[in-house]
Amino acid sequence: EDKVVQSPLSLVVHEGDTVTLNCSYEVTNFRSLLWYKQEKKAPTFLFMLTSSGIEKKSGRLSSILDKKEPFSILNITATQTGDSAVYLCVGGSQGNLIFGKGTKLSVKP
Amino acid sequence: NAGVTQTPKFQVLKTGQSMTLQCAQDMNHNSMYWYRQDPGMGLRLIYYSASEGTTDKGEVPNGYNVSRLNKREFSLRLESAAPSQTSVYFCASSEHGQGRIEKLFFGSGTQLSVL
């Protein structure tokens, strides 16, 4: 059975800290891995990773995929209270998306 | 730019009642989806529509029906609500679908409680 496992399930840090969120996956015919940020309600897209070893960056957020292990990490540097959210990792195969349960990040002032 | 719009935002039903969740997107996307999100679980696909006029079952379709009314609109119907259908429901759309892995655009969700 396909699955995506995220760790930790929850995390509390202080502003300015750097955090690493982990995602391992077992997805048949894996194609891509996606990260979403979910604040309050609607998930919003962060990254899609298809190639192993190539880091994607957007401001203080970055992510990398290792197809061999297989896993992905999402890094957030210099965290801010606005980074508080649930971060979702999604494994994609042809026509199918498998969502992880999410990591709840709380950033304290 | 509205994106994906869902209505209603909240709903309380009694067991056995029926209701329809509405979803519309203004991005001219081909594919639309309905997901449910339960505590401690990842989002699970209920139904999806790869194009106007087509619908397919997802992982958890039992107890639901859908209609792709036109390219913009995709509704989800609960014919006889059950407490197990208490959940947060998300509508989403993507540009192509048809087996492509691409980013989804989500609506703001409907919190449904069935008593």
Image (cartoon, helix red, strand yellow):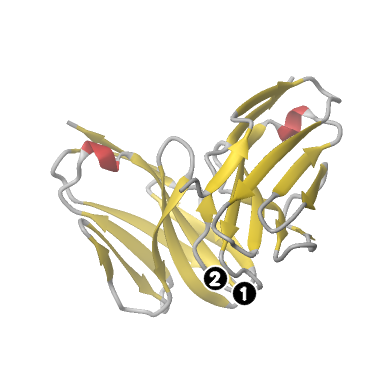
Vertical side of B56 occupied by A65: above or below: below
The reply to whether discs 1 and 2 touch (Cβ–Cβ < 8 Å) is yes
Residue position for label 1: A94
- Residue drawn where x is 59% and y is 78% of the image: A29
The chain carrying label 2 is: B
The quarter of the picture where residue A83 lies is: top left
- Residue drawn where x is 18% and y is 50% of the image: A18
The chain carrying label 1 is: A
CA separation in Å, label 1 and label 2: 7 Å
Rendering coords of residue A45 (x, y %): 42, 56
- Residue drawn where x is 62% and y is 68% of the image: B97
What amino acid type should be assigned to the residue bearing mark 2? Ile
What amino acid type should be assigned to the residue bearing mark 1? Gln
The quarter of the picture where residue B99 lies is: bottom right
Element type where label 1 sits in the image: loop
Q: Is residue B38 visible?
A: no
Q: Is residue A72 left or right of residue B36?
A: left
- Using the image as rendered, state which of residue A101 and residue A94 is in the foreground: A94
The quarter of the picture where residue B75 lies is: top right
Vertical side of A6 occupied by B19: above or below: above
Rendering coords of residue B3 (x, y %): 51, 49
Residue position for label 2: B101
Rendering coords of residue A76 (x, y %): 24, 53
Q: Is residue B48 left or right of residue B41?
A: right
Q: Is residue B68 visible?
A: yes
- Using the image as rendered, state which of residue B40 and residue B4 is in the foreground: B4
Element type where label 2 sits in the image: loop
- Residue drawn where x is 38% and y is 66% of the image: A72
- Using the image as rendered, state which of residue B83 and residue B5 is in the foreground: B5
